[in-house]
Structure formats: C-alpha cells, structure tokens
Image (cartoon, helix red, strand yellow):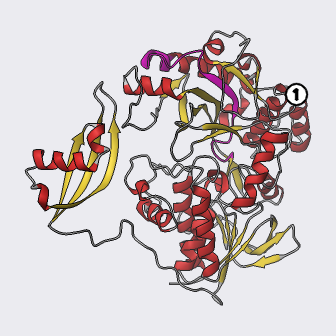
Amino acid sequence: MIQEYQLRVLPEIAANEQKLKEYLTLEKGLRAQDIQAIRTLKRSIDARQHTIFVNLNVRVYLNEMPQEDEFQQTIYKNVEGKPQVIVVGAGPGGLFAALRLIELGLRPIVVERGKNVRDRKKDLAQITRIHEVNPESNYSFGEGGAGAYSDGKLYTRSKKRGSVDKILNVFCQHGASTNILIDAHPHIGTDKLPRVISNIRNTILECGGEVHFETRMDALIIEGDEIKGIETNTGKTFLGPVILATGHSARDVYRWLASNQVEIETKGIAVGIRLEHPSQLIDRIQYHNKNGKGDFLPTAEYSFVTQVDERGVYSFCMCPGGFVIPAASGPQQVVVNGMSPSNRGTAFSNSGMVVELRPEDLENEKLKIENEKWDELCEESQSSSPLQGTLGMLHFQEIMEYSCWLQGNRRQTAPAQRMVDFTKKKLSYDLPDSSYAPGLVSSPLHFWMPPFITERLSKGFQLFGRNSHGFLTNEAVMIAVETRTSAPVRIIRDRESLQHIRLKGLFPCGEGAGYAGGIVSAAMDGERCAEAAGGYLQIE
C-alpha cells in the first residue's frame, strides 16, 4: 500500500530518514516494520517564526517497494532525413526547442556563436586572469547560455507557458539531481549544470540533429514576407524555418533586426547592483539564530520587494553561498551577475538589487550619464539622445556598463561601495572581502550612477534594513553594475502562432526575444516555439 502525507517537522527530522520513519510511526500510527521506503515529493522551509520548520510531502511505501522511476523519461526518436528547423542559440530556450523538435519528428540544426560548455570555461578564466573578454565566448555566449555558468536556478512563477515538471524531468533525465523535483526553489548549481548541458547536446546528436559551435548568425535570409534560413560568419548557409533564441545579450542581433526593419519594440528592464553579504550574517538574520543555519538547514535565501516613488525595488537572482562574477560580453564593459555551486558553501551570499525601469522613464533627466559613450551612441542613433527609439534601453545598458568600466580603471575591476556608506552618500575608504575575483575598487556609486536608480535603491535599503534587522550594514558591499536582468527589447510575435508578426517562419524565442525570464521559463518557451514550428511545417 502507498500513503501520502503532508508533514511539518523540525529540520533535524527532515534531514534524517530514520528519524522521519520514527516520526511517522509516532504521529501517524504506522508500524515501523511495514515502512519499506519513504520518498520525499516536495520540500520547503518555513523560516517565518523563530522555530524553523520544514514542510514535506512524502510518499510512504507500506509492505512494498517503489516500482516507478524517480523521474519521467521522454522518448527521443531518430530524426535523420526529416524536415529541419534552424535553432539559433544553445541556451535553455534553444536546447529545449531542439529536444522538442526531435519529439515531434523534426531535425534540429542548432547554431551557437560561442564554444561548447567545456571549452567555454577556459575563456571565463581569462576574464579574471588577464581582464580580457572574448566577445564570442563569455558568461552570456556559449553552450548553455547565460544560465550555464551563472547559477542554474530553476525556480519560476510562470505556469501558463508549459509544464514546469516536464522541464525538470528532462533535466533529471540528462543527469541533474532528482532533488530539483522536490525543492520549492530548485537549483542545479554551476558546478553540475555543464555536464547536464553536454548530455542534452549528445541526445540531439545521437538522434540525428546537428550542433554547430563558433557559428554566429549574421543575417536572416528573407524573401518577401518569409524567412528561408540564416547566413553565418563561417560562410555556411542553413535553410529552414528559424527559432531565434539568441539570449538577452546578443546586441548585434537586435541592431541587425532594427536596421533591417524587422519589428521590435523597447521593453522594461531592471537596473542596479550586486549586493554581497557574509553568508553567515544572512543565515543569522533569516533563521533568527545567532548560530546561523546549524547542521540541518541550507544556506539561507532572502527575497525583498517594495515600491519606491512608483517603481519597484527588489532583490533578484539571490545566490546563497555563492560568488559574484564578471558578466561582460564585450570590451569596455563591466557587468556583474551571481552564481552558486550546488553545495552553496562559500563564505558569501549575494543578490541583484535592482530598480524597475520602464520605457517611458528613458525621457527622465535623472537617467542621463554624460560621457563619450553617450556621444558615440547619439551619433549611431542619429538622435540628440541615444535613449530614444527601439534601442533606447539597450543604449542605456551600454552607457551604464561603459561608465563602470571607466570607474573600474578600464579593466574588469568593479566599482564598489559599502552599503551604509551608500545610503549616507559617503565614500568607502576601504572595502570588505569579496568573492568577486577580478577585484574591487572603491567608488562613490551614489555620485555617478543615475539619481533615478540611486535614490530608489537607498530608500529601499533603508526599508529592508528596518524590516530585517542587520541587513543594512557596512559588512555588505554593493558591486556595480547589474544591467542584464532581462532583454532590453521584445521581438514582436503573434500571440497564437508565435511567429513574428510579419515574417512567416521566424519564431522569436525565450529570454532574448523578450518572452521569458530564466532557465525554466525560457525552456518552456523553447518547447512552445518548437511546437509552433511543427505546426508551420504541418507536422502533426
């Protein structure tokens, strides 16, 4: 017999199967000798009160052993010789589009401008070692996309675009821990995700698909109102309908689309900094315990959100026990992001702390930063302000990142400031230890960053500090700048067919097209675009 129970237990019980078995016999009246196995289905931590509880949904096997697998397998068939679909980009949107195409009996041709996930790692090391960014192989470009080496968090609130469980099961099928099926905020970890991505690529190849690395799409082939394929930097042309999943940092793609009258529109993003605390401090705050997380709890997470002067101020992509990383995708940029290894075991915890920015805000004088990048982009956009037009938000990102590069001594050294000093508009004469490997330089962020952002961040920090005692502290360091929270444009597509509103056979996909916000939502959108491409080719 199989029974399921909702339990609310202390962390030491949740962490030990024998203690959990004893709890079930005591609280549920089960006989210990009847319990053959216990499988946890869902797990979450309730840290709202001083006594911490773990909420569990468990399946108990009485007088029988589990027969079913811990995850559901998807069958992938051979698609050699089948109609082909071009998938541009090997991030989660592109990879899951390719897998879904195989399910549908279509042959994916994946084109990725960066390197495979293993070789890509060498270029990431160079950013820290010699402060050199390879514009085709970095934290944004390469197999696995931006998520491969920036944390691998799988949490999403998006439920309407597809099956979250399907995506998580596919990850498990390719080597991810089945814990991601259980935890409320699933996380693979940057140390584990590359192997999973390699396994997905192998599935694509074994089924007859193709994957081309260091192959950048330079142009779409357009005939009338229809996409016929793509041209690449290698001289190769690939023909077929196109799923465009290039990620949120493919600025050359946005510029090509804009200059070739392919309809796009500017969209809102969020901009701010990466905030880093000692992880033990966050543990003490979140678990209401001077000893921190103890032996049975994971490194603590937090989530803050408020409204300041009619704009959202909130934490983003919180990385407990992680690192702050250099996420520039080209020269003369300093951009930061965060990641955590699977054990979340470093001495630091970080998150983006960002301010909502809407397209209409680009007219606000409090956003202006005057430097040579502003003038250069004015000339490019043939406007008195580079923040006008469909690429306005992209230009704002570039100006902010260039300013950080200047403040960081024209290297990947990042400008930084202690948290309380920022709220008091004081220069930090020294900085705390940090996980940011290229190094920090003290900089008055309150002075040179746009007031539209700094004033709201300061008010938000003060509110968060009042609500969570100890959070607003000079032990925490602000590292600039966080700009790659989402795509700065949306490639406009039809809501039903998912095709571009004018060009048949073009399926804008995932985060780079403005329709997703993370690994899982991009993967779900990739599956939907694959299904739409199948419909376009009249594949049942």
Q: Is residue 394 visible?
A: yes
Give the answer, above or below, for where 448 lies relative to 202. above
Reading the image, the residue beneath label 1 is 371
Q: Nearer the viewer, residue 138 or 243?
A: 138
Give the answer, above or below, for where 34 lies relative to 299. below
* Rendering quarter of residue 14: top left
* Rendering quarter of residue 386: top right
Give the answer, above or below, for where 6 lies relative to 244. above
Find residue 297 and report its horizontal and vertical position in percent.
Answer: 38, 37
- The residue positioned 72% from the left and 20% from the top of the image is 445
Find residue 435 and report its horizontal and vertical position in percent.
Answer: 66, 32
Find residue 471 and report its horizontal and vertical position in percent.
Answer: 50, 20
Q: Secondary structure at mark 1?
A: loop
Find residue 391 and report its horizontal and vertical position in percent.
Answer: 76, 45
For the N terminus, the image quarter is bottom left
Q: Which residues are magenta?
A: 463-488
Count how many numbered circles sit on residues in the image: 1
Question: Is 529 on the left-hand or right-hand side of 211?
Answer: left
Question: Is 531 on the left-hand or right-hand side of 247?
Answer: left
Q: Is residue 498 visible?
A: no
Kindly give the residue lying farthest to the bottom in the view shown.
Answer: 81
Q: Is residue 473 magenta?
A: yes
- The residue positioned 71% from the left and 51% from the top of the image is 140
Type of the residue with mark 1 = Asn
Question: Is 56 on the left-hand or right-hand side of 382?
Answer: left
Q: Nearer the viewer, residue 188 or 486?
A: 188
Label 1 crowd (10 A; few <14 / some 14-19 / many >=20): few
Q: Is residue 197 magenta?
A: no
